[in-house]
Amino acid sequence: MRYKSLTVDNINVEATIKKVQQLIAEEEHLSSALRATLEVMIMLVQLMANRLSLTSRNSSKPPSTDRFNTQDKDNGNDENQGRKRRRGGQPGRLGTTLQKVDDPDEIEILEVDQATLPPGNYREVGFEIRQVFDIDIRRLVTEYRAQVLEDQFGQRFTAPFPAVVTKAVQ
């Protein structure tokens, strides 16, 4: 499904990002560090723009979080697309719910502050469990170090890099 491109203060964010990427690709004199930094910044802008463009219609966000609500509040009709649909799941829709996992990656024990309890003797009878699913997006940089050997005549021999590693930074 294609969504209307995000515009902020009359600036088409998607088109602007593409233009900046093109300019960076055409610039021959950028240092590799600056180029990598700019690419990371562009990625962050894209992530934030994608987040801004999420609405209750194209994600699991509730309608109350929509920034620019295009629905008619009185009857739930979508006037922009000419369809009359009620809010919520439509007939025939198969819903999905996250299920608890048996082996979570991290476990945090939350203890009762017994100073806030009325006087008495207490014993632990178990735990109430809730799980939070987070998506961890992170940068992974692999540095390849090719060994360099030099013989008695000053001739150097360098170990080959993997075929896909063609630049100092990529």
Image (cartoon, grey):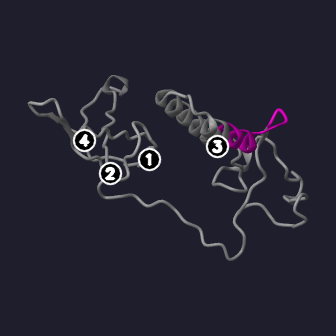
In this image, 100 relative to 12: left or right? Answer: left
Q: Which comes sooner in the sequence, label 2 or label 4?
A: 2
* Of labels 2 and 3, the one closer to you: 3
Q: Amino acid at mark 2?
A: Pro
Q: Name the secondary structure under disc 1.
A: loop
Q: Nearer the viewer, residue 92 or 36?
A: 36
Label 1 to label 3: alpha-carbon separation: 19 Å
Label 3 to label 4: alpha-carbon separation: 42 Å
Bounds of the magenta segment? 8-20
Question: Which residue is denoted by mark 4 in the rendering?
Answer: 124
Q: Which mark is on residue 104? A: 2
Instruction: Please determine whether, in this image, residue 19 is positioned above or below residue 38.
Output: below
Q: Nearer the viewer, residue 101 or 122?
A: 101
Q: Are marks 2 and 3 in contact (CB under 8 Å)?
A: no
Q: Which comes sooner in the sequence, label 2 or label 3?
A: 3
* Of labels 1 and 3, the one closer to you: 3
Label 2 to label 3: alpha-carbon separation: 27 Å
Label 1 to label 4: alpha-carbon separation: 24 Å
The quarter in which the C terminus is drawn is: top left
Label 2 to label 4: alpha-carbon separation: 22 Å
Question: Which residue is denoted by mark 3 in the rendering?
Answer: 51
Q: Which mark is on residue 132? A: 1
Q: Amino acid at mark 4?
A: Glu
